[in-house]
Amino acid sequence: MTSTISPRRRRKIGCDVCGLCISNTWSSSLAPLKESGNQGCMRCRMLAESACLFEDRWARGSRNDDTTVQVVMQEGLLTQDVQVFLDWNAESDGQCERLEIEISKENEADLPWFEFKTRPIPSHYYDTQKCVNFIKLRLKTCDSHELCLNSTEPHRLSGTKLRNPSRLLKILAVDNRLEILLTKTSDIKYCYVALSHCWGAVGVPRTTKDNFNERLGQGLSVSSLTQTFQDAIDLTFKLGLEYIWIDSLCIIQGDTDDWIKEGLRMDDVYGGAHLVIAAAHAKDGNGGLYTTRKPLQKIEFQSPTGFMMRAVVTERKGPVDKHDVWKKGEQYWTADDLPLLQRAWVFQERLLSRRTIYFTSSEHIWECRDSIFCECGNLQGKRTSFPQFGPGGTFKTRYQHVVNWGNDIERLNLWHDITAQFSARDITFHKGRLPALASIARQINMVGELGRYICGIWEDTLPQGLLWWSEFKDTTRFPRPDNRIPTHKREKKDCIPSWSWLSVEGRVSTWGRGWKTLVKMTDISYNLAGEDPYGECRESAITLIGQTAPVEIGTSRVPDGSLVVRQGSSEHEYEFLADTQPLEYSEEELSRSQLIALLFAFSGGVLGGRIIGAEKVCLILRREAESTRCKRIGMVEMDGKIFRGAKDEEVVLI
């Protein structure tokens, strides 16, 4: 008969080094842990061997050894899991450096201590058959989700139904090799895979006007394609599916009419796909789906009683967990090792698809409209879940809920997050910014509660919807120390009006300013380039009535190099929130320009007909000569004294 000791009790008795940690935080230098481990404490030995795996990090130079390196354990506030840190003094300046490591077990019986969690360990090598089995298992689970069903009936809110892509690639097995044949679709239901990938600088195979008929009449050998295309087609075939959609081969490249028509149908293409395959780690077509994964570091030793101890030790890099990019629903996100997720078009593909299998450098990640799943189990865990989503929830699951059931307030709130996330992503051609967001906008306004869609802004939010601003922040949430680094740009010749946040390439925000508008909107002129109300615009203008004052933009008298707004010789300076970084106009161009501040809104209150306790926000505009037409170049917050005696005038924003 064996006796048992509660986990809490077991931690407080036995070893004098690791067994007396009653508080939430405990630490010890490495040397006592090693000695205790040699004397028989298996917990000390495990911690010591885990620290020694990273000796190349803390033992650089001669400043540190096992007497100076500290092993710190800190219990989580919400769970019984622990965080483990290694602390040491840097060789260069003696400052404390910290490395967080995670100690886990693959099976519950591998370690006897409850605080180290059990999680699956992804294989360090790829196996296509294991991949196929993984996908089939996830598909079976996903097919039980109501949100993931691919209904052929019209959507309950919009009354529309998904249409087939205009073309698909049919996969043919010819003499023990695979070929693809471009096929025009009919009205029958097709079960197909769609590929999400980075084109990159190397170029990808394309269908053009010149080879279009050849693609329709003659099979193309899969072995002649890029590695990513080969892997995706081979995987589709092994899954037992006959068709695949690949953008560069199914849309006629160089044909503007075909691009406009097909580019606005991504909700049909990705929403109707049986599965989306995403080459998340590949920066171009040579990357493929599969990559050799870095082997995980493991510890294995036998206790004096014959118990085999096994642990997996991994490094947590920086303040952001590698899984955070999948979970975040706010404005900031990181995806440095996932180039695919840095693309604006892919942001749309992610939200529109029923389900996607992502191939990353470390594991497969499955995301559908209902939940998310990864091989290591992190994304399913309560500890790593964001409260706004719950375990297994993501920005995509929130999106699907709002699209299906959200009211107008929920849709607008989600749109704020969408603009922040979309604007932070890259796009090759500026003219693609409206089409790359079109299908999302169409779904957000499915019931027509938000009014007309006008270049990324909903008509019912105007004029307050014009109060967006550029966020000069990198992905670690800190301002860039060098404000000469380009972060935001605007095309000089652009059909997207300057008053739209879509005119600027770079992170923008539309959140958080509770301004009460002072301008009156009298007219909206918005001419589309085509028939789709969410597509490109040909020209547009918004006419406002409000108070204006002449201003200048220059360098601050304070030696920090920042741009400020001032009026004439006034000593008052106001921080200029430019739309672009660097500013899109040179000092010479500004000196020859007529710049005005349009008193747009305020925060505070009204007493006796007077605005009190308020900050005023103004749009800074560049006026065309002898005209009321103006282009936006930024915004500023000021006290409003420069508008004393100003009269209302008409301003046409273009």
Image: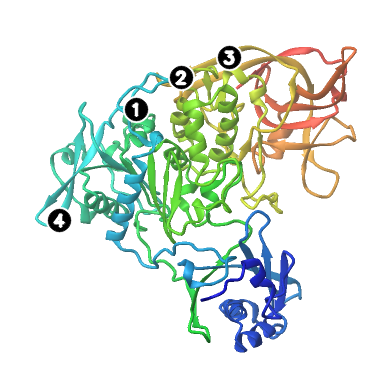
Residue 637, percent from left and from top: 79, 31
- Pointer 1 with pointer 3, Cβ within 8 A: no
Q: Residues within 10 Å of mark 4 (few under 14, many from 20)?
A: few
Whether residue 65 is visible to the viewer of this picture, yes or no, is no
Q: Residue at x 61, y 82 (%)?
A: 41
Residue at which label 2 appears: 528
Give the percent coordinates (x, y) of residue 383.
58, 53
The answer to whether the residue labelled 4 contacts the one labelled 3, judged by CB atoms less than 8 Å apart, is no
Say the numbered circle drawn on residue 563.
none
Name the residue: 74% across, 25% down: 515
For badge 3, the amino acid type reads Ile
Mark nearer the N terminus (1 vs 3): 1
User: How far is the residue under mark 2 from the one under mark 4?
Assistant: 47 Å
Q: In terms of secondary structure, where does tag 3 sit?
A: strand
Alpha carbons under labels 4 and 3: distance apart: 58 Å
Q: Amino acid at mark 4?
A: Arg
Residue type at numbered disc 1 = Lys
Residue 641 coordinates in the image, percent (x, y) = 88, 24
Q: Is residue 205 visible?
A: yes
Mark with earlier residue (4, 3): 4
Where's residue 345, x and y in %? Answer: 44, 40
Indicate left or right for 103 with 67 as reference.
left
Q: Earlier in the sequence, mark 4 or mark 1?
A: 4
Badge 1 marks a residue whose secondary structure is helix
**What residue is rendered at 33% in x and 45% in y?**
139
Res. 524 mark: 3
